[in-house]
Amino acid sequence: QVQLVESGGGLVQAGGSLSLSCAAAGLSLNTYLLGWFRQAPGKERAFVAVIDWRGSNTYYTDSVKGRFTISRDNAKNTVYLQMNSLKPEDTAVYYCAARARPWSPLASYTNAPSYNYWGQGTQVTVSS
């Protein structure tokens, strides 16, 4: 059974940092494109960042550029999201997702239906 398990969420003050992790079980992420999405209350799930299978190319939504960094460690079967300079508007449930056999540029994978597997989510709350 495939599982993606996020961890690292929590409560932080504006301007602070959090580091999210997403570990996979039941599949090897080596050839998967990996993404992070978030969903705020009353809003649709929104793209945050994506990284290719090598970890050499990344793509971010404009609102997090320069503040968030996505990375991966294929040996540990894990993807990370380092979040700095957090703002109250970053408050959401954060989800990791995996996409098998990507063939398009990273910017093509910003919609949730593009992904095959999802984690259960981890809450990030940023207080003002």
Image (cartoon, rainbow, N blue to C red):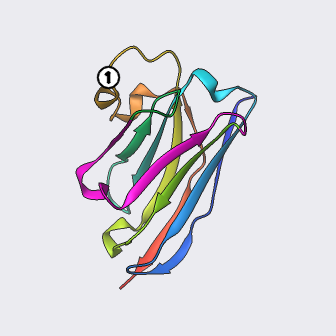
Q: Is residue 102 above or below residue 13?
A: above
Residue at x 40%, y 29% (from the top left corner): 113
Residue furthest to the front = 56
Q: Is residue 38 above or below residue 113?
A: below
Residue at x 57%, y 65% (from the top left corner): 9
Q: How busy is the neighbourhood of tag 1: few (under 14 within 10 Å), some, or many (20 plus)?
A: few
Rendered-image quadrant of the C terminus:
bottom left
Residue 36: x %, y % from top left: 46, 45
- Going by the image, does 125 lie left or right of 20? left
Residue at x 38%, y 63% (from the top left corner): 41
Residue 58: x %, y % from top left: 39, 38
Rendered-image quadrant of the N terminus:
top right
Q: Quadrant of residue 86?
A: bottom left
Q: Is residue 87 above or below residue 20?
A: below
- Going by the image, does 59 lie left or right of 32? left
Residue 66: x %, y % from top left: 31, 58
What kind of residue is marked 1? Pro
Q: Quadrant of residue 64?
A: bottom left
Q: SS class of the residue under badge 1?
A: loop
**In this orientation, which residue lies closer to the viewer: 37 or 43?**
37
Residue 32: x %, y % from top left: 55, 25
Q: Quadrant of residue 110?
A: top left
Residue at x 72%, y 40% (from the top left corner): 76
Q: Is residue 9 above or below residue 3?
A: below
- In the rendered image, residue 6 lying in the magenta stretch gets the answer no
- In the rendered image, residue 74 lying in the magenta stretch gets the answer yes
**Number of marks:** 1
- Going by the image, does 66 lie left or right of 94? left
- Going by the image, does 123 lie left or right of 28? left
- The residue identified by callout 1 is 105
Magenta part of the chain? 58-76
